[in-house]
Image (spheres, helix red, strand yellow):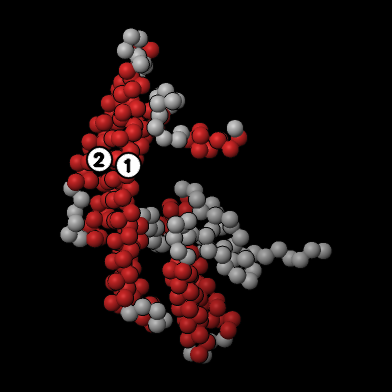
Amino acid sequence: MGAPCGIEDRNRTAPFPFCGNRFEFRAVGSSQNCSFPIAIVNTVMASGMATLASLIEGGMSHRDAVAQMYKDNKSVIFTGNGYSAEWPVEAKKRGLPNLTTTPAATATFTSEKAKKVFKEMGVFTEEECVARQEVMYENYNSVLSIEVETLISMVDTGIVPACAKDLATYGAAASLAGDRKATYESIVAETKKLKEIFAKLPHDDLAKEATYLCDTVKPQMAKLREVVDKAEGLIERGVYPYPTYEEMIYSHHS
């Protein structure tokens, strides 16, 4: 007979699967230094062990202490598909937070609960929590602002001129142009909207700036990208100024 199968969470979509003798953490972005998330994970682990130790030191048996912690925290265990739409619904039923954006998550870094844990574990003082939060907001705002300005520049200096050149080739055969004119004009219109929205960015409050970028600017960036993606499939191959999705994905096959 083979070894008995473990019943721990081995779900490949879980951010914190337990693999018998270790936890795996799968939530760090490719551009992120993993040291900060690891510090947070270790703080959470240390806090949990401190709670367990206090129960045992208070007179509970090892078994009863572990059972009590399981009872108090079992709501975080989910063995379904963590990438599916069912998890946010289930999380809400269990009373768990579901922070889907960076500004929403960053805002919780200075909650009373967070500051208390960091202070008790000797990781951050309350002032350091505030400072860390400010750095996170500044980084988010700076990166996203650069992305907005880069997108606008790429459209104005590359996409729009390419659209004009492509449309000009149909001057003598307008019936063959299809919906190119409407698509290309919509790029200009959506770019103008993005510029106007971005110009109203509030600079007096880092949290408000981050929320505005996330909830107002990013959706407009997505609208602009949608019409540019459509144009990519219409513009003559030799005229399009940037690598197409096809070239980026399949160029190694040529």
Residue situated in front as seen by the camera: 110 or 60: 110
Badge 2 crowding class, 10 Å Cα cut-off, few under 14, some 14 to 19, many 20 or more, is many
Q: Position of residue 196 (x, y in %)?
A: 19, 41
In the depicted structure, whether residue 82 falls above or below residue 22: above
Is 169 situated left or right of 60 in this image?
left
Q: Position of residue 125 (x, y in %)?
A: 33, 79
Q: Secondary structure at mark 1?
A: helix
Residue situated in front as seen by the camera: 205 or 245: 245
In the depicted structure, whether residue 246 falls above or below residue 31: above
The amino acid beneath tag 1 is Leu
The amino acid beneath tag 2 is Leu
Q: Position of residue 245 (x, y in %)?
A: 48, 35
Residue topped by disc 1 = 151
Task: Please tell me whether mark 1 or mark 2 is closer to you in this view.
Answer: 1
Residue at x 33%, y 54% (from the top left corner): 143
Q: Secondary structure at mark 2?
A: helix
Q: Position of residue 109 (x, y in %)?
A: 33, 68
Q: Evaluate whether residue 75 shows in this view.
A: no
Mark 1 vs mark 2: which is more N-terminal? 1
In the depicted structure, whether residue 15 falls above or below residue 124: above
Splitting the image into 4 quarters, where does residue 176 fall? top left
In the depicted structure, whether residue 109 falls above or below residue 183: below
Task: Check contact, mark 1 vs mark 2: CB within 8 A.
Answer: yes
List the single residue furthest toward the right.
Answer: 1
Badge 1 crowding class, 10 Å Cα cut-off, few under 14, some 14 to 19, many 20 or more, is some
Count the marks: how many? 2
Residue at x 32%, y 60% (from the top left corner): 139
Task: Name the image quarter holding the N terminus.
Answer: bottom right
Residue topped by disc 2 = 194
Q: Evaluate whether residue 51 shows in this view.
A: yes
